[in-house]
Image (spheres, rainbow, N blue to C red):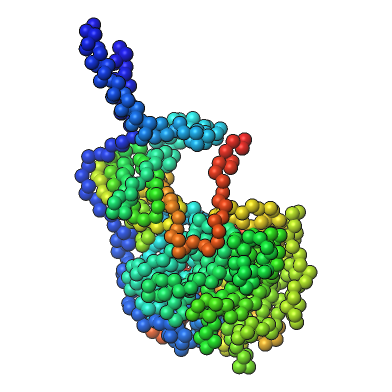
Amino acid sequence: MLPPRNRFGAFSLAIPLLTLALAQFLAGCEHAKLLRPQVLKQLDTDVAALVNELPEMDHQNKAIIGRLFAQGGLTRASLGEDGIMRGRIRIPANEYIWKPAIVVMPQGGVLELDVANEDVAHHMMYMPHNGEREVLDLPAQTRGIIRVQLDQPGYYWFGCPVANHATRGMLGLVLVKGEVPPGAKLDRPPQPRPPEGRDRHAH
Amino acid sequence: MHTKLLLGLALALFAAGCATSHPDLPITQQQRSLNDFDRTQRKTAPPVADAVTGERIMRARSEPHNWLTYYGAYDGQRYSALDQINADTVARLKPAWIFQAAPIGLISSPATFALEAAPIVVDGVMYLSGWDGQVWALDAATGDLLWRYHHAIPLDLPLCCGNVNRGVAVAYGKVFYSSPNGHLVALDAKSGKVVWRQAWLDPRAGESSTMAPLVVKNMVIVGSSGAEYGVRGHIDAFDSQTGRRVWRRYAVPKPGEPGSDTWGANDAWQRGGGSAWITGTYDPQLNLLYWGTDNPSPDFDGRMRPGDNLYTNSVLALNPDDGSIRWHYQFTPHDVWDYAGVNENILFEQDGRPLLAHFDRNGYLFILDRRTGERLRVTQFGERVTWGRIAPDTGRVSDRQEPTREGKYICPGPAGAKEWTHAAYSRKTGLLYTPVIDLCGTFKLIETPFEEGLGYWGGDFIATPEDAKGGYVKAFDPASGKMIWSTKFPFPMVASVLATAGDLVFAGEPNGDFDALDARNGQVLWKFKTGSGIHSSPVAYSVRGKQYIAVPTGWGGWLKGFAVDTFGASRGSAVVVFALP
């Protein structure tokens, strides 16, 4: 048994560590954000059924053959001081998935992705771009940078054009938020937009 | 024990933190354009577009080997003076080359893509746009791909009716293209590289773009799409060198502006529709631009917009220098059938008088004096027309049959007795030729609250294959308004017709047949099965003395509105070009 002062010393170390960890957890962690009411209220029966089914479904060659493409998760591209939005994507081994598979751009502009292919298979990233589609060739266990321009709000797809990789899980989306420039707006008062969550809990 | 637990929890929380690890692989891979994976492309086009100017386009009739602007010339006649391919030789017409395009991956509105362009041809180079943001420069004699441009198009773009684009404009060394998501892009005509880009539409407001720009003087003129989403439609002019906007003309006036008293005293004007998605025609002598406007919004429910709803369903005669309206003529006052007035306005002369011919979706042919908009003649050209009667002498509409909650059977369908696909005028026969749709159906009224970015139809149109009675190509004498001949086809005719000095009228069918008709009597002289339905604007040109006929093919668009009986027909996407052996 440890002497009391030693016990007290370890305890005094644990308290600030725990506080720090909790602060980090609550401030930045996606898990903590799940507890927000606007997130929880999305868990209607249909969404709960989806989440409950995923452990059975979302693996290579389990209940279905491939993966559900959106299950790589999401990343928010960070806006750099140079005006370029940046994000990072991995291709984990034997998963046939982009991780994350959804990239959110806070506004239209230039997106730069750092993409690492950890897989033992060859992959390619086929990206939309104003000009012509851009391609990042990623032989097994290589990494590269791809930069594209997407100026208008909406969502765009990207994927791996090798064999059936895209529809076996390697489909991804770039979501561009924001509005068009003021000069492209209609001259009229602000109009009502569709309300949020109209069909939630409509069962 | 508590201490160990606390330390363990702290570590677990750190581990569960949000920083994601990135593997320690060196960065070795560089991106490349898809064009770099295509060594079949020449990557460059000869500098033929450098010498094309607004002045030269005014004289387009003096160079029949080219198809310099959307309709071939500013007059909208879709007439070619080339006659190597003619009523005597057409039987020997054979494919010269085929250009094909197919999607890699996903595209917006995936069941609707179609090639709808009128290819532009300048001294042996063909420029055209396709679905989903694509622009190509081709060798007009061989079909070789010279360069390709692709604009990134979001999958969720509000496209009411099709992932389509009707072409480009070429002048001043540039190719002008309006992307579906509302960027006007000037490309270097030699390389396909962007010279300037201008965002001019708001997809969040339901706007999009489908039309071919028109170069007039030093300006590029475009019109918006989106009247099915309750937009406020407009026509914009941009400086061709810089992309700076010169003017914008809204088709729906604000309160207090001329025409605003035709909307009722509410805010319906704010989402009144009236987009302008078909390229206008232009009379350089009168310096007037003739531009059609779309239906008012919501399409089928007029109760919140009492009045004529100017300037929807109209032709606007605009001063191209400032966008001001010189005169207007409204074809369907207070439209509740989606009989958009965007169809082309063909300019021609009769007994020295400058006239304008317009085959409206509402089933009537209008002949106007294009100096003033004075109505000279109104003639029914549609087969079954029951929405109302237009008096030939006064132009007044009577006996209106409007959509009801229960549904009312009305003719023609919402894409009209003639869709946007264009008529032609032969300078040789002096006749007008038009494709015709014979479709009726049930127009139903459904209360629809307005929400920006969502469809704002105010109802629905229901038709079955039994309601479709095929189509026609018809010839009319503009002097009398009388029909000269009519040729029936098994399916609705929804490709632009092309008239040539070879006494031929070319027409395309939904079953993929491309036909040459005798311009004098409508007899089908030649047919070729292209393999997919035709919903585009064929053109004529020649290179080194050899005449070609080019037709973009590929079935798509708003089939519900005009060809309900062919939704399942073969799809494809190709430009098929014909010549004599």
List x then y, in percent, for residue B53. 40, 82
Q: Residue at x 20, y 44 (%)?
A: B26
Q: Is residue B316 left or right of residue A37?
A: right
Of residue B567 and residue B412, the one placed in the foreground of this image is B412
The residue drawn where x is 75% and y is 59% is: B408
Q: Is residue B226 left or right of residue B122?
A: right
Position of the C terminus of chain A by quadrant: top right
Residue B389, visible in the rendered structure: yes
- Most extreme residue toward the top is A1
Q: Residue furthest bottom?
A: B351
Q: Is residue B297 above or below residue A176?
A: below
Location of residue B562 (image quadrant) = bottom right
The quadrant holding residue B191 is: bottom left
Q: Is residue B24 above or below residue A138?
A: above
Q: Position of residue A112 (x, y in %)?
A: 31, 51
Which residue is found at the position 45% from the left and 74% from the top?
A: B246
> Count of labels shown?
0
- In this view, the residue farthest toward the right is B399
Name the residue located 59 percent from the left edge and 55 percent from the top edge: B455
